[in-house]
Image (cartoon, rainbow, N blue to C red):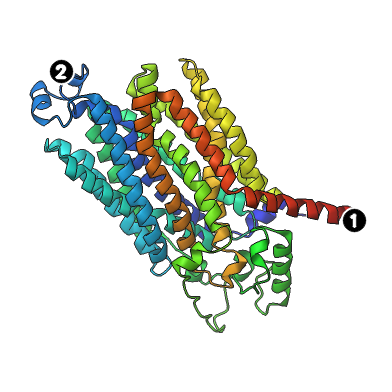
Amino acid sequence: MSSPCCGFLAQYTHHHLVAFLLTFFSYVLLHASRKTFSNVKVSISAQWTPSAQNASSPAFSPGETWEENNLFADSDEATLFLGVLDTIFLFSYAVGLYMSGVIGDRMNLRYVLSFGLCGSAIVEFVFGTLTEWLQFYNIYLYCGLWVLNGLLQSAVWPCVVAVMGNWFGKSGRGFVFGLWSACASVGNILGAFLASSVLKYGYEYAFLVTSVLQFAGGVVVFFGLLTSPKEVGLCLESETGLSPVERDADSHRPLMSDEEDEEEEGEEEGSEEVCDGGYYTIQQGDEEPRETPKAIGFCQAFCLPGVLPYSLAYACLKLVNYSFFFWLPFYLSRNFGWKEAQADRLSVWYDVGGIIGGTIQGLISDCMGKRAPVLAVSLLLAMGALVGYSHSPPDQVVNAALLATTGFFIGGPSNMISSAISADLGRQEALRGSQEALATVTGIVDGTGSIGAAAGQYLVSLIESKLGWMCVFYFFIVMTGGSIVFILPLIVTEIRAMWRDRQARTHQL
C-alpha cells in the first residue's frame, strides 16, 4: 500500500516539475538583481558624495572623480535620495502590478514574463553599470530608469503565480506554494552572495553580473516554459477544480473548507471525464474542446470575497518585509559598524527564516484547512520578534539568530499572502468557472502591498534621519499589528468554521 506522500507526489508529472523550477528560478533571478541595489547602497552613497564628506572615497574612485561627479553635499542627502528611489520603484511597481495582472489574464503568460525579465535586466544594466562606466551621474536619469524598472518587474510576479496556479490545484497548495514562494528569499540570498563577491571590483560589477543572469533567465523562460497543462493536453478538471460551481452564499464561507472538497469529489464522480483516480492524464483526441473562459474584469476581481482585506493586510506587512529587504544591509553596516560585505552576508539569515516560515506555515494551513488563523498567530509572534531584534547586541551570531526568527514570523506570512492565498482568492467559488482571474487577483494583492511598501520606504528614511532606528522598529510593530486588524473578520469567520466542524464531529461520535 502506497504511503500518503507517494500518493501526493503521484499526481504530478515532469511537466509540473519543469513549471515549478522555471517559475521559481525566474523570480530568484529577478529578486537577486533587485537585492543588488540594497546591498550596494553604502558604495553608491559614497560614490555620490564628495571626498571631503566621505572618508572611504579613495577605495571606490580616483580623487578627481569625486569633485566632478558628486550629486549630493553629504551622505545624509544621498541616503534620503536612496529612500526616494526605493519609493519611486515601489510606486511604479504597484501601478504596474494592477495593469500587468489584467494583461497576463488576456495574453500569453510566457511572453509577458519573458518581456518583464529581459526588459528589467537591460534597465538595471544601464542604471548600475553603464552609467558608472561612462561616469555619467544624473538624478533625473536615475529616477526615470527606476520608474521603468518598476513597471517592467511588475510583469513577473502575477505571471509566475498564475502559471503555478494553472499547474497546481487545491490539494497541498499551502505546502507547494509555501515551498515555491521561497523564490524571493533564495533570490535575496543569491543577490547578497553575488554582490558581496564582486563588490571589491566596484558596485557596477554587481549590477552587471545579476542583470546578465536575469536576461539569460528570460530567454530560457521564453523557449522552455509551458504556462498551462492544456498546452500538453493534460486534464485540468479534477485537480484544479476549475469546473463551474454554483454560487451559494460564497461570500460567507471560508476560502478553504471541507464542504468545498466534498463538492469537488461529488462533481468528479458525476463527471463524464475520467482522470484516473483524480490525477493528471492525457485527454482523448476525440473530445470536444472546451470554451475558453473569459477573463474577469478588474473591478469584479477587486470585489471578490477576501481580496480587499488581504490586500490591505499585505500593504502593512509588505511595508515591513520590504523595509528589511531594502534597508537591512545598510542598517547593519551603519548601526553596528560592520563591513558592507559582512552586512550583506549576515542579512541572508532574515531570508532563511522566511523560507522556513513560509513552508512550515503553509503546511500547517493545509492541515488545518484554514489560512487566516495561522497568519494571526505568526503576526502576533512577529511583533515580539521585532521588539527582540530592536535590542540586538553587536554580536553577529546573536544578530543572525534574531534575524532568522524575525524572518520566520514576518517573511512566512508575507510569502503565504502573496502566493498561496492569492491563488486561493483567484480560484474561489465566486468566479463561477472563470479561471482567467488569477493573474488579476495576484496583481491586485501584490499591487496594494507595493503601495504600502512604497510609502514605507520613504517613511523609514525620514524616521531614521529624524528620530533614529529604534523609532523605525516601533513603526514596524504598529504596521504588523495593522495587518492583523485588516484580516480580523476573516480570522473570526474561519475560527467559527473550525469550531462548527469540531462540534459536528463530536456529535457524530
In-image side of 282 versus 74 (left or right): right
Where, by quadrant of the figure, is residue 252 drawn?
A: bottom right
x, y percent for residue 9: 63, 54
Vertically, is 414 above or below 151? above
- In this orientation, which residue lies closer to the viewer: 186 or 138? 138
Q: Position of residue 304 (x, y in %)?
A: 55, 63
Residue 93 can be seen in this image: yes
Which residue is most to the front?
466
Please state which amino acid type lies under the numbered disc 2.
Ala
Structural crowding at the residue carrying mark 2, measured as other residues with C-alpha within 10 Å and reported as few (<14), some (14–19) or many (≥20): few
Residue 52, numbered label: 2
| Residue type at the position of mark 1 | His
Image marks 1 and 2: residues in contact by CB distance under 8 Å: no
Q: Measuring 37% from the left and 40% from the top, which residue is drawn there?
A: 32
Q: Which mark is residue 134?
A: none
**Residue 507, disc:** 1
Counting residues from the N terminus, which is met first, the one under dot 1 or under dot 2?
Answer: 2
Classify the position of the C terminus by image quarter: bottom right
Q: Is residue 505 above or below residue 233?
A: above
User: Relative to 412, is 452 on the left or the right?
Assistant: left
Under tag 1, what secondary structure? helix
Residue 3 seen in the current view: no
Q: Quadrant of the N terminus?
A: bottom right
Q: What SS does tag 2 mark?
A: loop
